[in-house]
Amino acid sequence: MFKILLIKEIQHYLYSLRFHVSFVIVMLTFVIGTLTFIPSFRQANDNYVRYSAEQQSQLERKSKNATVVAVSFSTFSLSPEGNAIISGCNGQHLPDKIRYSAFNVYDFKVSHSNLNPLMKAGRELNWAFVVSVVLSFVTLLFAYDAISGEKEDGTISLMFSNAVPRGVVLLGKLAGIVLVVMSMVFTGIITSLLILVISSIVQLTVGFVIEVVAFVVITFFLITLMAVCGLLASVLCRSSNISLLISLCVWLLFVVVVPNTAVFWANKVFPIPHADEIQRAISLGRKNLNDNAPQGSWSSSYMNPSWERHKLRADLQTKLMMNEKSQRDAYYTQMFNQFENTRRVTLFSPIAQFDYMNEAILGGGYLRFRKNWDDLHLFQTAFYNWFHGLDEKDEKSPHWFNPYEDLSTTRQEVAVDQIPVYTERMAGWDNRFSSIAFYFSIMLIYTTLLFGIVVYRFQHYDVR
């Protein structure tokens, strides 16, 4: 019975005009998104290669003086990822550069390669966009009249005159919608992969294949949840027009309202100080330190590293750095907490759940930024210990560590290949799958609860 009903539902959707129109739109979006990704990725990769070469050249120049290597600001820049065709993980809105030295991890910034800073970058046409925006709407479009529409034309009452179990009918409709929408997903992904392979942009490595499979699985559960939402709208109404209106409102809430009000809720529910307040606190601390510093703390003589006043200068510069570090680190912690708390609020939206699962499985977005931020702090400690050990071996050095200036520590040349260089380590598969577990559980509970309501309503639905 279930098999017959499922085949009937699939045939009904495949022969419908809504499927034909939706299929064309979905395929166009997949193809156009892939074609626009190729030149963008190439340009980003070329820029990153040039940037890396410039960084290496600077390191070679700095190697003439070990202290210059230690105190100079270095900038770690996130490399472009080929799996961004699956999902950009909102990386265009997140920090992509982190500034550090052997003494401190200073700050981060958003610095993208857009030639015109006045142009606001929108969402990329990657696979995640197609699924979360286009196919989520298509799923609701298929599901909104699954019950109410058949009630209007009398089909469902005729069906139940043959004593068909209502649970079987409901499962058949849900499975039919999910399978038809997933057929569009498979076709679009295969087409996109063919274009990428032909263009030699993406190599079909084992890791990339795992990411694609994981994306398909995540997509399946999102489509199922959206289909359940459409069925719920259908069983709540006796008119397909009303169920369509409810479905549209649900889609707008999940796709438009929740993401675009996240900043508002963050500022209202999880407020943090303004950046200007932090800068004023840093300036006040700097003034107090300068006012209370011993006389001669700003004196310097580059030709005499062992000048006594260099010790006073090094102590003051260290205190100034620690003053700024304590203020900024506390502020960054508040920023991270605000961001993470806001994400928990937006979990109300299945689209947000879908995005966070993609971020977890791809190791991108905020997950990637935070891992590099935390790893850089560990690296900075090792970098400082390396410099400290190098300085101790220099008998000519007075060993007064100044975090900003080349005045009172070793000036010996160091081999470039001996200089510690931070290298990004991507999150392992165990960390990725453990990160996805929470969001997956939320989506599964969400789907189960809503489907339970659908079953209850359908059992009491008047089909006459």
Image (tube, grey):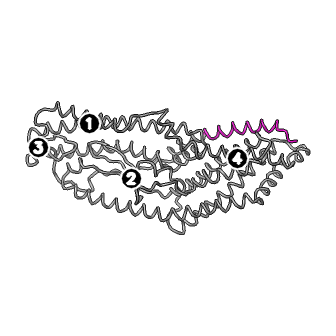
In the rendered image, which residue does mark 2 sit on?
111
Magenta region includes residue 254: no
In the figure, is residue 462 to the left or right of 220?
Answer: right
Q: Residues within 10 Å of mark 2 (few under 14, many from 20)?
A: some
* Residue extent of the magenta highlight: 441-464
Q: Nearer the viewer, mark 3 or mark 2?
A: 2
Picture residue at 46% right of the left edge, 47% below the top? 427
Q: Residues within 10 Å of mark 4 (few under 14, many from 20)?
A: many
Checking the image for residue 150, the label placed there is: none
Question: What is the secondary structure assignment of the residue under circle 3?
Answer: loop
Q: Where 108 falls versus 180 (above or below)? A: above
Magenta region includes residue 462: yes
Q: Give the spatial CA distance, label 4 vs label 1.
A: 56 Å
Checking the image for residue 227, the label placed there is: 4
In the figure, is residue 423 to the left or right of 59?
Answer: right
Q: Where 285 falls versus 306 (above or below)? A: above
Checking the image for residue 300, the label placed there is: 3
Question: What is the secondary structure assignment of the residue under circle 1?
Answer: helix
Q: Position of residue 71 (x, y in %)?
A: 23, 47
**Of label 2 and label 4, which has the lower sequence position?**
2
Q: Give the spatial CA distance, label 1 vs label 3.
A: 23 Å
Please state which amino acid type lies under the numbered disc 3: Ser
Could you say which quadrant of the image residue 27 lies in?
A: bottom right
Q: Residues within 10 Å of mark 1 (few under 14, many from 20)?
A: some
Q: Nearer the viewer, residue 317 or 246?
A: 246
Checking the image for residue 283, the label placed there is: 1
